[in-house]
Image (spheres, rainbow, N blue to C red):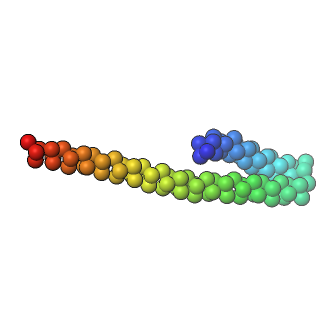
Amino acid sequence: MCFNRVLRFPPTVQRCAGAFAKVKDSQRMSDEGKMDQEQVDGMKRRCRVVGFALQAEMNHFHKRRIVDFKRMMQSYLQQQILFYQRIGQQLEQTLHLYDTL
């Protein structure tokens, strides 16, 4: 699940970058008198909303990644502890076998 989210970021970032580029073009057109400033201001507001949404999505992704990594490491370490405890038990059993020789 986490991997799928990572794959979605590049296109989303590209769309956001494209939106910012359009705002720059619109501002240039407004400066040249080819576009109304109100339209440019509306585009800027929408572009900021898109940027904030992208930032929120990235923040959420990083928080989830931290939680997922913590759970994965805890599970891994618990299994390692059980594995080495079993090895220790088998070594103790082997040691006791030498008592009967």
Determine whether, in the image, residue 13 is placed left or right of residue 76: right
Q: Is residue 37 visible?
A: no
The spot of residue 79 in percent (x, y) is 39, 49
The spot of residue 42 in percent (x, y) is 85, 57
Placement of the C terminus among the 4 image quadrants: top left
The spot of residue 16 in percent (x, y) is 72, 48
Name the foreground residue: 93 vs 25: 93
* Residue projecting furthest to the front: 100
Q: Quadrant location of residue 43?
A: bottom right
- Residue placed at 44% from the left, 55% from the top? 74
- Residue placed at 67% from the left, 42% from the top? 8
Name the foreground residue: 13 vs 57: 57
Name the foreground residue: 31 vs 21: 21
* Residue projecting furthest to the left: 101
Q: How many numbered circles does the render carry?
A: 0
Determine whether, in the image, residue 76 is placed left or right of residue 50: left
Q: Is residue 46 visible?
A: yes
Placement of the N terminus among the 4 image quadrants: top right
- Residue placed at 89% from the left, 58% from the top? 38
